[in-house]
Image (cartoon, coloured by chain):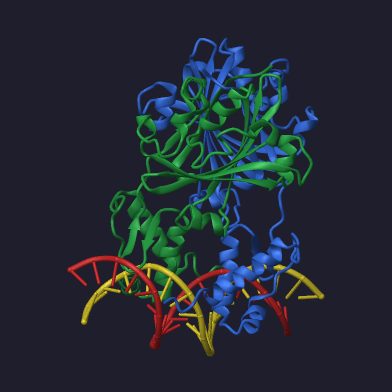
Chain colours: A green, B blue, C red, D yellow
Amino acid sequence: MHPDPQSPAQRIVADLRDDIAAGRLPAGAKLPSVRDLAERYDVSRSTASKALILLRNEGLVVTRHGSGAYVREAYPIRRLGPDRYARHRWEQTSVEAFTTGVPGSDSTRQQGHQTQDVSLVAADEPVSAALGVEVGSSVYERARVMTRDGIPTHTMTSYYLPAHVEGTPLVDSSPGIAGPGGGFRVLADRGLPPHEITEDIQARMPTAEEALLLDLPSGEPVVEVRRVTRTADGQVVEYACGVHAASRFVWSYTYAIPD
Amino acid sequence: MHPDPQSPAQRIVADLRDDIAAGRLPAGAKLPSVRDLAERYDVSRSTASKALILLRNEGLVVTRHGSGAYVREAYPIRRLGPDRYARHRWEQTSVEAFTTGVPGSDSTRQQGHQTQDVSLVAADEPVSAALGVEVGSSVYERARVMTRDGIPTHTMTSYYLPAHVEGTPLVDSSPGIAGPGGGFRVLADRGLPPHEITEDIQARMPTAEEALLLDLPSGEPVVEVRRVTRTADGQVVEYACGVHAASRFVWSYTYAIPD
DNA sequence: TAGTGGTCTAGACCACTTC
DNA sequence: AAGTGGTCTAGACCACTAA
């Protein structure tokens, strides 16, 4: 027979979960301290602490060392659809508008920010497969970390064939091209206008580096997006891979049912 | 000054992570036991155990109670694209082919299985918003749990307007309609052929019930897919919400860059 | 039966936050 | 200085697995 239907830690977790779900502990509210819980439930402090860790791993709670445990606030969620690549966002604008250090020209992007790091690297397997070159070939890598309200939200690393971007501001100038449309604009200028995109979407737990880089709360998954961009005649002009904090994004696609 | 750049548990985690990444511990390999680790690193058993829990939460390791800890095997990943809804998969077939208990008629679906549970429920907020009815209205709910090789992979719960499906085998017959195309076929038969789909994709940690239902290893995220299906004239004929074990799926979409 | 992971205790100490 | 979460210990006990 099962002697214990629920362990002490699980009882605490269940109770707090209910309190959160019922709104008795609204978003941002402070949870009882570890020492409080230990006394109330007559368990050791380790057990009470474990309960908080479990709630944290579920994404329901964030802990602030030295301060307390709090019901996690819901972030505003950004909806990502094909529109974010729309031609009008990059076609009619000057390349200079994409340059870092020229802020405010597009107020819709006001809160966004990004760092950038362009270098020539050897293509690994996924990159070479997407761009159609041999493993180890030299390709341009453009690594970015996107920030929103001072908090990193996702990374996006693009790869280009040197023949496509050599001599463009994308890889030559510093501080370089900023904004999501900058790369597309440069490709279009080189006679390689992007036409079609394939996006692969997959979720997983972050690596240790990603958790650090994106400042992820423990228990937050990431969504990896791999994007292949082609011209109208099917030529691949960009491969990009991004890692997104899962709680901040929804991807949305609308399409006709195929035959 | 920081006295400890790395805690004992983190040292163990880092070492094992390296062993896994380097292939010294290949997929399926058994890790050293908690007692082994405790002795080797001269730490308490609790600390060694914690290291395994951290690796499990990263999705790198699975533990089998009483047996040991093992490097997690990579599942075969299923690629989900618009093709899975293709017309030819449901239009030309007889409704009977979708009925549970008539296996093997479509060998490509041989390994798949599903349970089904149809009932009339009150629409909650997301359902009513999608179907365009008031909260609390009666709608048909068709809840399914999909299985692959005996292991549950995802749930899929569809909602229909009673006026659309009343009197059809979708809600009347038992065991009822099976297979992904069954619902579309029935709607088409009623003069409401599905034409367009909008899918919203979001990742998060599972709830306690989901982890149980889908038999998820600790640290496995889920992907929630919400689907709205419309006819050619824009009428919504189905709202569906699925929860998928993240490690078993990739979603793939190809589209032309919009203006 | 021997070995395994899982949970818990009681207490120590540390690092951080808040006042 | 007081209160907080985080980590660790040494040991106990339980539940499960495998031979």
Determine if residue B142 is in view: no
**Residue A149 vs residue B8: left or right?**
left
Q: Determine which quarter of the picture holds residue B94.
A: top right
Residue A26 vs A104, above or below: the answer is below
**Residue A23 vs residue B186: left or right?**
left
Question: Where's residue A242, x and y in %?
Answer: 57, 42
Question: Where's residue B214, x and y in %?
Answer: 59, 48
Q: Quadrant of the N terminus of chain A?
A: bottom right
Q: Residue at x 59, y 23 (%)?
A: A188
Determine if residue B147 is in view: yes
**Which is nearer the eye, B22 or A99?**
A99
Q: Determine which quarter of the picture holds residue B55.
A: bottom right
Question: Where's residue D11, x and y in %?
Answer: 53, 89
Tag count: 0
**Residue D1 vs residue A67: left or right?**
left
Question: Where's residue A52, x and y in %?
Answer: 41, 64
**Which is nearer the eye, B250 or A86?**
A86
Q: Residue at x 75, y 33 (%)?
A: B109
